[in-house]
Image (cartoon, rainbow, N blue to C red):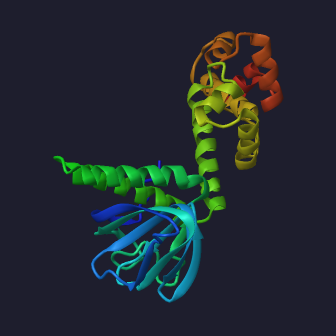
Amino acid sequence: MSGTTRIEGQPSIVGCGTFDNDEQNRFQLDLHKHDRMTEILLIEEGEGEFEIDGRGYTAGAGTLLFYQRGVWHKELSTKHPFRAAYIGFEGLRIKGAAPGFFFEEGESPIVRLQEHLPVVRKLMRDAIAEYRRNEPESETIANHYLGILFARLARLRLYGDAGERSRVSVKEAVQRARRMIEENYASPITLDALAAETYLNKYHLAHLFKAETGVSPIRFLIYCRMEAAKRYLITTDLLVKQIAELIGYQSEPSFYNIFLKAEGVTPGEFRRRSRS
């Protein structure tokens, strides 16, 4: 498990709320900035025109906008109903970015959430609802929601492209399957069991495993069993039948044939050569 993090300072909420505007009551704020806080605005429905740091953006439902500390911006809803939620916060520190900044200067300050919208929306709504409760520890709980939100946003935007994240997860899945085989080679391991361990489709896992290791999971299982068999043959006086059972074979002839095919000699001949 990786302990990587780029979040060096956790954000604390200083203000939050929701908007629900129509044609007669548009959401509109003229050019302004916040010197102490950064603000995020999530558009849940409708569309608007936004100017952030001198650049114009059209943003609709499922877009998260960042008004970073000290950055000039203005907002206008253009398609209605227009529903949005916002959170203003202090204290965020991202490695490589200025205090209060989620993105480095020059990067686009908007995130189109797509399939991540439900999670982000719930975290924001939960944080806002808890902050407004005005009960003991409400701010603490709300800030925890906000911290989880930024951890998810960091995972989404700050750790390379989707292909790179996929490659990392592939390596982790293959490593988990490999370790399961190494530690349980004497058990009747199946592709279904490996798939359950890695949360992948078994055929997809088999393809990924071979791409990463050069062999199929079954071939790697045989390799682990043969390595263990050789260890027993060299260091013990156990009968070949006993060794076969210890490494997962119920039939001595099956073990004998597989060992001969893998090593080029019989188990008995391997033992004699090793000891001579």
Q: Nearer the viewer, residue 146 or 179?
A: 146
Q: Position of residue 255 (x, y in %)?
A: 75, 18
Of the 4 image quadrants, the one containing the C terminus is top right
Q: Residue at 44% of width from left, 49% of height from top?
A: 122
Between 255 and 163, the one nearer to me in the picture: 163
Q: Is residue 85 above or below residue 180?
A: below
Residue 81 in percent (x, y) is at: 54, 62
Q: Please indicate whether residue 7 sits to the left or right of residue 243 in the image.
A: left
Q: Quadrant of residue 173?
A: top right
Q: Is residue 87 left or right of residue 267?
A: left
Horizontally, is 166 left or right of 2 in the view? Answer: right
Looking at the image, which residue is at 45% across and 82% down? 74
Q: Residue at x 53, y 69 (%)?
A: 23
The answer to whether 243 is drawn above or below residue 150 in the figure is above
Q: Is residue 168 visible?
A: yes
The x and y percentages for residue 184 are 58, 25
Residue 140 appearing in the image: no
